[in-house]
Amino acid sequence: MVLTLVLEDDTDGVGFVLSLQEPDDEAEHYDWKKGIGADPKDDLTVPAMSFLISTTKSQYLDDDVPKGERIFYSVRAVNSKGDGPWSAPVSRVQ
């Protein structure tokens, strides 16, 4: 199952709330990855992304977000059968 990632500003104005539009019922956990774009105005050029965290929750709060930088995220579901496909990347500038 390809997941759809939703990205919103955190209510306190620092960081982003990442959540799945629809969690995967078969997921044992989710792997999240993150990258910083070279140009904050460019939302099409996806940078290399690094592993961020593995969690059992379908929502993640990232408070480690530099101001003025475009941050990209992707997520995948993982279970005993293996790793699911990475979601389409989403991005935002804070």
Image (tube, helix red, strand yellow):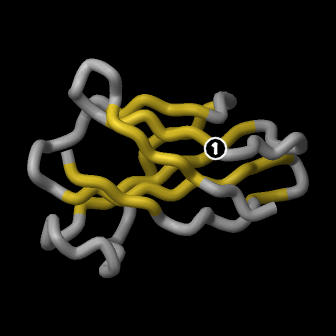
Which residue is painted at 28% across and 33% down in the image? 15
Quarter of the image for residue 47 reads: bottom left
Residue indicated by mark 1: 20
In this rendering, would 71 be left or right of 20?
A: left
Look at the picture and state if 71 lies above or below 56. below
| Of the pair 50 and 21, the residue shown nearer to us | 21
Look at the picture and state if 35 lies above or below 38. above
Residue farthest toward the bottom in the current orientation of the protein:
45
Quarter of the image for residue 46 reads: bottom left
In this rendering, would 14 be left or right of 73?
A: left
Location of residue 5 in the rendering, given as x and y in whole percent from the top left corner: 57, 52
Counting other residues with Cα less than 10 Å from the Cα at mark 1, is it few (<14), some (14-19), or many (20 or more)? Answer: some
Q: How many marks?
A: 1
Residue 51 appears in the rendering: yes
Location of residue 92 in the rendering, given as x and y in whole percent from the top left corner: 30, 54
Which residue is painted at 89% across and 55% down in the image? 81
Location of residue 1 in the rendering, given as x and y in whole percent from the top left corner: 81, 61
Residue farthest toward the top in the current orientation of the protein:
12
The secondary element bearing badge 1 is classed as strand
| Of the pair 13 and 24, the residue shown nearer to us | 13
Q: Say what amino acid the circle numbered 1 marks.
A: Leu
